[in-house]
Amino acid sequence: MIFGKAHDGGASTALLTDRYELTMVDAALRDGTADRRCVFELFARRLPGARRFGVVAGTGRLLQLIRDFRFGEDELRFLRDENVVDAATLDFLEGYRFTGTITGYREGELYFPGSPILTIEGTFAEAVVLETLALSVLNHDSAVATAAARMSIAAGDRPLAEMGSRRAAESSAVSAARAAYIAGFSATSNLEAGRRWGIPTMGTAAHSWTLLHDSEEAAFRAQVDALGPGTALLVDTYDIREGVATAVRVAGTSLGGVRIDSGDLPTVAAEVRAQLDRLGATGTRITVTSDLDEYAIAALAASPVDAYGVGTSVVTGSGSPTAGMVYKLVARQDAAGGWVAVAKASTDKGSKGGRKAAFRTLDDGTATSELIAVSDGFEELHTAASHPDARALQVPLIVDGETDASFEGVAGVQAARAHHARVREELPVRGLALSRSDPAIPTVYVDAE
């Protein structure tokens, strides 16, 4: 996809949004409320699929996209030609730059219902236009990361490779690979994800490689000649037993691995392991693919499998393709300059107003609750000192329009991956189960003191 140029020379992300955000800005500029200070919050009312935890992902990507949220000539021309906003609003948008403050959960952090994943503070006009961008990034990436974390838990110490690019849109495939890596996958088949985010890449050959050659043996010999005996050979194009025998005959007992992409995987894996051992290829690793999800991976826990390759399920959130997060106004200034907590009051889609501070209470290192302190206005919220047995969850991401670059790029991905590995250790044992259930820990609200 090609966008216009932002004022800073990057690709503009300003039209990755919904029309109503700009019509609200247009009306707010007319009635004088555009500059009213506001607090928006991004959170999830519930965990999709009755899962026991969620994983925050996409934050580093979002910060870069917000930096490029500028209205250049192409964007302004489109808005003018389509009569989306009036001339005064076009003038405002031409100089748009987010100058507010965003705090939030670190990327890789766990979240639960009501967790204030992002808190966006600024004028109404500059904060409201970020709604769609923030939700599109975090809803997608967090859904993938949550599914990937569950798969990582099911896999235990066995490595996981993400290989779902052919089951996602081209840009989504790159962000999905990034999210899966943060949540515990060890590699991706997607080269752009490797280039852009520093994720290890993997991949050897498909069935078409075998079918190209006059025989399976010819295909294996050509692959070994090109990549060495440490390569992994795909042995199920024809007969698996014959494929394994041919693979060892061609590469010798130092054959690096075989990949199985079909069949009753627990049974086939056991048979292949036994055959490899009989042939003396005791160090040859077995990788399985074939439409795996967290449940199939868990079912293979007792099988002699060394690694997994996961495609469709991980890039689509394994049945929950969105995290269901929302972006709501929770506090605003009134006409006199005082602060007022506001909230949507509908029965099934209500929200809790007020600015919030979030902590995870711990008992001997194990999470016991998501503790959220709520302020009706802007008085001092709880600090970590208020909860010595809890871990503060929010960090500054953007302060007065300036982004903390440590959350971006390759370094940001590595930091998020390391943070996720640490905080997942805090989950209580019941939080590791794959079955549908209530969240692993309760969300508890307390009034700010």
Image (tube, rainbow, N blue to C red):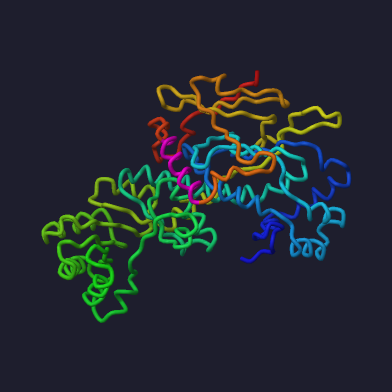
User: What's the magenta bit mostly, secondary-structure-wise?
Assistant: helix
Q: Is residue 345 visible?
A: no
Seen at 36% across and 56% down, the residue is 309
Residue 67 within the segment the image draws in magenta? no
Q: Nearer the viewer, residue 83 or 357?
A: 357
Seen at 86% across and 29% down, the residue is 336
- Asked if residue 404 lies left or right of residue 377, the reply is left
Residue 325 is situated, as x and y percent measured from the top left of the image, at 60, 43
- Which residues lie in the magenta part? 410-424
Residue 183 is situated, as x and y percent measured from the top left of the image, at 44, 45
Seen at 52% across and 42% down, the residue is 107
Residue 326 is situated, as x and y percent measured from the top left of the image, at 64, 43
Quadrant in the rendering for residue 375: top right
Q: Is residue 89 visible?
A: yes
Q: Is residue 248 above or below residue 315?
A: below
Q: Looking at the rendering, in which quadrant would you find the N terminus?
A: bottom right
